[in-house]
Structures are given as C-alpha cells and as structure tokens.
C-alpha cells in the first residue's frame, strides 16, 4: 500500500451514524436525548435468561425494539448476519451517506471496528442449538465467532479498500476506534476513516459475571426500571446495559469536497495503568485529560462541556469526578449520556462522541436522568431538563477494564 505524507490540515468529522434502544438515526436519537427518553425494561432477547428458567427475574437493560436495515443490502447476506453485524451495517450506512463517501476513492478509505467478543449471545445460542448433535455446525460459524466477521461484512457491502481491522479496549473500544481512525488519517495511510463502536451482544453468562463482580446494577429497581440507571447520583449501584452502536467518519480537511464538518479533532490521549481489574485509575484519568488538552493547545478553562464516561459505578464515578476536579474542569457543563442510553460497553465511546457533536450542533445539552442527589453537587450539572447552551470546545472521556483510559478533545468547525 502506498503511504502518502500528510499535510498540516486538520482532521475533521464529516459524518455520524447511531443506533440505540432510544432511537435509530441521528434525528430520532437527538430527540430522545433532549427529551430524556429511556427504554429501560427487563431484557427479553433469547439467550439473556438462565437456560431452562426463562420465567425467572430477568436483568434490566435497554434493547433495540426494531431495526431498520437499508433495502439495498442483499437478503442472503443478512440471513446469516448477527445482530451486531446488522446494526453495524445500518449505522455505517447513515454515516457513509451523510459524509458523501460514494464519491471517495475506495483505496483511500479505512475502517476501524471498536470492540471484541461482541457476538457472545448468538454464539451461546449456536452452542445450545447443536448440543444434541455436536457433529454438525453451520459452516458460517467458522466466520461468525471471529470479531473480524464485522469487518468482512462491512467491507463486502461498502467499498472500503484501504484497510479494515478490529480494536479491543473493553468499554473504551468505541472511543479508541475514533482515535485510531484519526491517527490513520493524520499519518496519510488513508484520506477517510470510519470508526465504529460495535454493539456488544451479551448473553446471560456475561451479565451474571458483571453482576457478580459488582459492576452491573442490582435488582433494587426491578419494579421501576426507569430509575435504575443513575450515573453520578448517590443512589447508583452499577451500570445498566443498553444496546447501542455508533459510527464516526473522520477525514483530512481539504482532501475532498464534503458537507460542512461537525468539528475538528484537536487533541487526544490514551493511558494504561497496568491493572487487570476493573478498578479505575485516578492518575490514568488525569493523564489523558491533561494529554488531550496539551495536544490541543488548550487550557482547562477553554473547555466548555465534558461528556464523561459516567457509568453509575460506585467507585468509577467518584474517581472520574476527582480527576475532572484535579484538572480544573469543575466549571464546565456536564451531563451523562449513559443515563439515557444505558452503557453500550464497546459502543459507548463512539456513541458519546456522536452525542457530543449533536449537542454541539444543536446548541443544547441533554438532561441527566435520575440525577436527584449528585455525588458532588459543585459541578456544572445538567439535571432534569435539557438546557440551551452554545459551546465550541468539548472533551469526552472513556475508560475500560484492563486499566485503559482515553480522552478526545473536539472543537466546533467554523
């Protein structure tokens, strides 16, 4: 592959795609954000209950009720595509068309899929279906159990010929995919790169493990699912899952004609604190905030809005607020997108970049659901109602198991 040397022009974001339980597509998703609309309920997808005990109390979460997939995609392909794959195709399609990529050179387009182990529920179901005749397995299983299946399917249906690969970083995967896409464009490897935060389709066993380790919320709000997801509130007791997928198109400004960009990516940073466990790292979170601001040439005082990781974890939320305070960001407006969407795990970082850019363009901030008693009331919270707010500079944070922290700094294009 020929590598072109980059120039000094900025990397811009020109297209967005989003699919969540509260809305598919930017318009419906934006409306849901500003209305504070939720979809939390007992989860009913097959494979998310204890096998043989489907009537037992299910886990709470937010599931996509209906998925609209473009008619142009061949039915023969969709028949063997997983839920994660079908959602990826629909989400990329929206971003692709907004950015006008049909006219781009396919050999100069890349794809980074953020997420690993994203098809666990369907794989668990496949094992169960063949338990009585283990000598048979559908040949496509040899493709479907690999994360690269999403890359293969997306590049089969979209003319992406620069490169395509997956990137795993637990709950930071979606944002790390965006950062990797920016690096690919900055380096000159491609002119355009799509970053996808893939839908993580979990089975009963993954949810049980999250519950057992204390990361996922309890059954305390089983009779009132809408109250269960409460990032930064003193009554939080863990994250609540939400099916989601986000796509972001980044490209080198001036490389081709395109619609008016949403924003420039002006700073980003990652860190790892050498820790297998889910314990958050204050030092790691401070380092990525400071690193992203330094690369952007900004001070903390320049940041007007923070989109935090904010999962509803007891120690995670407290650590993040301490990091924001240590970095001098207590003045910035802050809300928690996961309070509306739930925690999309591998998708979360990409979906939250989308949410940040939509709020920036709409000059409005969405509410934070269930923020009744903030863990630290001194921050510039957006609480029960959406708020008109024009801002140009934002920072979004993501963290993942394994000691991962990342941050991206965005500045409105003008």
Image (cartoon, helix red, strand yellow):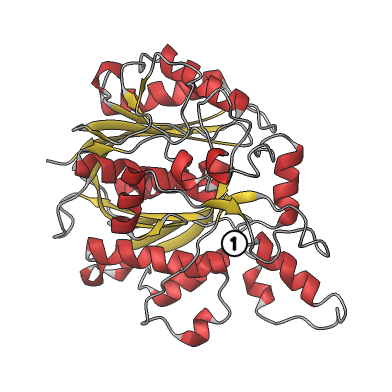
The part of the image, by quadrant, that contains residue 146 is bottom right
Is 16 positioned to the left or the right of 309 in the image? left
- Provide residue 148's location: percent of width, then percent of height: 56, 64
The secondary element bearing badge 1 is classed as loop
Residue 19: image x %, image y %?
42, 59
Q: Please state, as top left, top right, bottom left or bottom right, where the N terminus lies in the image.
A: bottom left
Between 172 and 9, the residue placed more toward the observer is 172
Does 49 sit above or below residue 223? below
Q: Is residue 30 above or below residue 68?
A: above
Nearest to the observer: residue 275 or residue 325:
325
Tell me if residue 301 comes above or below residue 186 in the rendering. Answer: above
Q: Which residue is mark 1?
A: 147
Residue occupying the point 38% across, 43% down: 36
Residue 80: image location, x then y, percent: 58, 79
Q: In which quadrant will I find the C terminus? A: top left
Residue that appears at 69% across and 33% down = 276
Going by the picture, which residue comes out furthest to the front? 223
């Amino acid at each position: 592959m020929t590598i072109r040397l980059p120039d000094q022009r900025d990397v811009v974001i020109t297209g967005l795609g989003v699919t969540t339980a509260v809305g598919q597509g930017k318009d419906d998703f934006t409306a849901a954000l500003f209305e504070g609309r939720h979809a939390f309920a007992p989860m009913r997808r097959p494979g998310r209950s204890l096998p043989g005990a489907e009537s037992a109390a299910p886990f709470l979460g937010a599931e996509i009720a209906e998925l609209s997939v473009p008619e142009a995609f061949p039915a023969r392909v969709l028949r063997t595509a997983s839920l994660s794959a079908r959602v990826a195709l629909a989400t990329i399609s929206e971003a692709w068309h907004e950015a006008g990529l049909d006219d781009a050179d396919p050999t100069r387009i890349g794809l980074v899929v953020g997420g690993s182990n994203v098809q666990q529920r369907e794989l668990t179901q496949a094992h169960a279906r063949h338990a009585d005749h283990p000598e048979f397995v559908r040949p496509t299983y040899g493709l479907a159990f690999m994360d690269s299946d999403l890359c293969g399917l997306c590049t089969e249906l979209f003319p992406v010929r620069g490169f395509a690969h997956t990137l795993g970083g637990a709950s930071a995967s979606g944002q790390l995919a965006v950062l990797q896409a920016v690096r690919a464009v900055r380096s000159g490897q491609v002119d355009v790169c799509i970053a996808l935060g893939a839908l993580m389709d979990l089975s009963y066993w993954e949810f049980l493990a999250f519950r057992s380790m204390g990361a996922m919320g309890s059954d305390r709000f089983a009779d009132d699912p809408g109250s269960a997801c409460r990032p930064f509130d003193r009554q939080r007791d863990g994250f609540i899952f939400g099916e989601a997928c986000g796509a972001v198109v980044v490209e080198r400004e001036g490389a081709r004609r395109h619609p008016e960009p949403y924003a420039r990516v002006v700073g980003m940073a990652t860190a790892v604190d050498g820790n297998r466990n889910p314990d958050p790292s204050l030092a790691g979170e401070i380092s990525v905030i400071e690193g992203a601001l330094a690369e952007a040439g900004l001070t903390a005082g320049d940041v007007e809005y923070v989109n935090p990781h904010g999962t509803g974890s007891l120690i995670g939320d407290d650590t993040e607020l301490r990091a924001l305070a240590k970095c001098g960001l207590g003045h910035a407006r802050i809300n928690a997108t996961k309070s509306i969407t739930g925690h999309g795990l591998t998708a979360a970082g990409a979906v939250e970049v989308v949410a940040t850019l939509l709020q920036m363009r709409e000059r409005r901030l969405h509410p934070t659901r269930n923020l009744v008693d903030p863990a630290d009331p001194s921050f510039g919270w957006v609480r029960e109602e959406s708020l008109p707010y024009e801002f140009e500079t934002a920072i979004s944070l993501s963290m993942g198991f394994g000691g991962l922290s990342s941050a991206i700094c965005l500045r409105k294009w003008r």
